[in-house]
Each structure stands twice: as C-alpha cells, then as structure tokens.
Amino acid sequence: MWEFIPVNTGGLTFVIMRKTNDNKYKCIGSNQIHIPATDLRKSVQFIVSEDKRIVISQGDVIGWFDSGRNIVGFQDCFQVNETCPLSFRLSNDVGEGDVIDIESLSRMSNRIYTMNYSTIENRPIAFGLPSEPVTIPDHLNVDSFVTTIPISDPDYGDYIQDFKLDYDNEYFYFDTTLRSVYVKEALPHIVGQHNTTLNILLTCEDSCFNSATANITITSFNVPPEVSDFTDELMIDPNKLSNDSRFHIFSVEDPSDDNISCGMKNASYSTDIFALEMDDNDIYLRFTNHTEISNNSSSEYKLDIFCEDGTEETVFKLTVNVHSRKNDQTNIGTDPDVTHIVIIGICAFISVLFVVLFILALILNCRSKRMMRESSEGRINTDMSTIDKTVEPNPDVEMEQTVNQQKANVYVEMSAAGKP
C-alpha cells in the first residue's frame, strides 16, 4: 500500500529499482494511479491488488514519477537540527526493465517528501511432499526418474531463486528445472535385505532470501524373481514319455541379477515322479519315473513351484494332466484344436447347404412362373380359335360395336346411302 497527500492532479507512477552489478539501478516493477481533484490535500491510500504487487528486498530504491507536476507535496528542508535526505529527480518516465544511472540524475537536498508504504509479510516456500515415503525398486539404473517435488511460493510475484541440494547425497540428485529427483549412483542392494531407507535434503530460497528445507524419504525394495512364458496347465500323453522326457514350463530372471533357485513345495509324490531342471533362465519339468503312470489311466497332479533370489520368493501353481489318448473315443471336446476345426467344418457345411437350397428355390420359382405364363398363353389362343364361322352375327352386338368405335374416333364419315 502507498499512502501520501497529493497537492496536484495527474498521473502518478510508483517505481521500485534494484541495484545491478555495474552500480546502476534497474526498474523491477511499477504501480500507476490517477489523482482527481477530489483527492487533493487528503490522505490517499493506494492499495495494490495482489496481481500488481511488487517483490522488494533489502537495498531496493523506492520512488515515483509525476512528469514534474509535483503531485506529492513537500516542504523545504532547513539544516538546523536535522539532516536533509538526499533525493534524485527523474527526468523521464520509467518502465519495468529500464536501467537508470542514478549518478547522472540531478540531486535535491533541500526538500522533504512525506510518503508511507507498507508491505505484507513474506510467506515461506511450500513443498508438496507425499504423505507416504516414495518407494522404488533397488535395481533402477543411473539417471532413472524417482519422483517430482512440487515447489511453490504463496506470495504473488515472489520466485524461487536458489536450490541448495544435499550434494553429498550418494544416491540421488535434483533437477532444478524439472524439479524432480533422479538416481545418481547404483542403489544399495543387499541379498537378504528387503528394504533400504534413504533420505534426501532439499533447501530452497525465494527472492526475499527466505529459505525452506524439505526432507524427502525414499525407500528402495528388493524385487522378487520375475517369471515369463508360464502356463498354469500342462497336458501330457503318458504313451510318449520316457526317462529323458522334459517339458519347458517357464523362464525366470531376477532384475537385480541375484542367483535364482527354483523348486517344488507340498508335493510328496513329486520326488518320485517329477523333478525341476534349470538351464540358464529356462525351467523344465522332467518325469523321473514315468513307468509309475499307467498308460490307460488319467491322473492330475497339482504342483506348488517356487523361485527365490535369497531375499524374495515367487510362488505359483502348476496343474499337470497325464492323459492317455488310447482311452479317447471320438470326442470333439478332448482336443481344443480338433474341436475348433470340426466346428468350423460344420459351420462351413451348413453355409454351403443353405446356399444350395436357396439356388434350388430360385430355379424352381423361375420354372413355375414360366410354366404358368405358357399355360396362360395357351388358354388365350384356344379361346380365340373356338369362334364358329357359320354362326351369323347378332345385329345388336354389331351395332353396339360400331357405336363404340365411333365414339373412339372423332372423325367419322357417313355415306349418302346410309342417310334416312
């Protein structure tokens, strides 16, 4: 807020200037107000709206410009018991961004101006920290994204001018442009340790030299072995088994490159019939004693298989169906591929049958219409040929026909012999 007593009307511009490196001053902001005649010689309070506020700091120069109209009143300064303040007269209007060399301005040391101004209290920087620790896997590569830290200043016009990161942090760094945390070095990974808690300290400073500090907690965790290409059901024909029979059931790898071991749980019969074999990252199920499985019977085995890396464990279930195809009758549903082929064949046969029936119906329909047309034409010819030439015409009918013909023809000639 600016407060003063105007003595003349006109436009008044308040300016804030800040010293630059070359001992000059740059205008960092300004406010404008128009003084009407009704405000003369009264205390005027010009309250700046929030979107027009100017951030000031220690060492800034406060002044105004009035085009020489002396809008702000002054008194002469007499150096008796007080020291007169040093003032500078602006010769031209000043706008935001203009640089002024104060040493080139004219000085005034014999006037005292009365101008009051007030500022609002600076509010601290706000961090948008999550309520829970940030969790990341401990196998992230260097420069991998971790999290974004929202940073804001509640004061309009205030800005964050400096970030002071804990640069001694071993594992993370902060991107001041994106305001995000990234992995700096390989994260700690200890076999047998599930989680590791890490911290990062971030300090920011605003344009009013007020600082705020945030402590960010990051938890890295061990990831269990990852399984791919796994099917939960394995169909086996015992007639094709041998002691060397083995079946690929899945692939496994550990993101942290830990040593992986896999086995079976809760299956007492598995040691007699099944065994797991690992070839690099591929896991196979092998039949160790296939002779115990009857070729003419059907059996179902449910296996609990696990893979662990010394810290975490992955467990999944596998169903093994041992089914002899000799016992199969002609059953469409036993083989999904055969079932699909048969269904497709039936649908194709029905479609072809419908097309043939439709074509036959069209042919029959056309033939029926042709026969009806030929029959109709035959009847007409027969009726016309039954007239008896020996029968004398009925005079009444002849006259009626003649009259009808005359009506149909406008130009009718009558012979003289025909006159009464």
Image: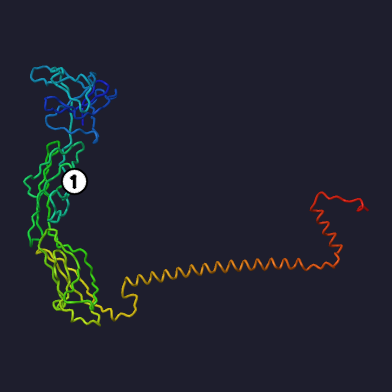
Judged from this view, the residue extending furthest toward the right is 420
Return the residue nearer the eye: 84 or 315.
315
Instruction: Mark 1: give few (<14), some (14-19) or many (20+) Cα within 10 Å.
Output: few
Residue 5 rendering spot, x and y as whole percentages: 22, 24
Frontmost residue, 187 versus 132: 187
Quadrant for residue 310, please give it: bottom left
Circle 1 sits in a helix, a strand or a loop, which is it?
Answer: loop
Amino acid identity at mark 1: Pro
Quickly name the residue at label 1: 150
Residue located at (14% from left, 56% from top): 137
Which quadrant would residue 337 be assigned to in this image? bottom left
Q: Quadrant of residue 285?
A: bottom left
Percent coordinates x, y for residue 7 in the rendering: 24, 21
Residue 242 place in picture, x, y as percent: 18, 77
Give the answer, above or below, for where 28 lies relative to 105: below
Q: Quadrant of the N terminus?
A: top left
Q: 216 or 68: which is nearer to us? A: 216
**Taking 120 as reference, is 347 left or right?**
right
Number of numbered discs present?
Answer: 1
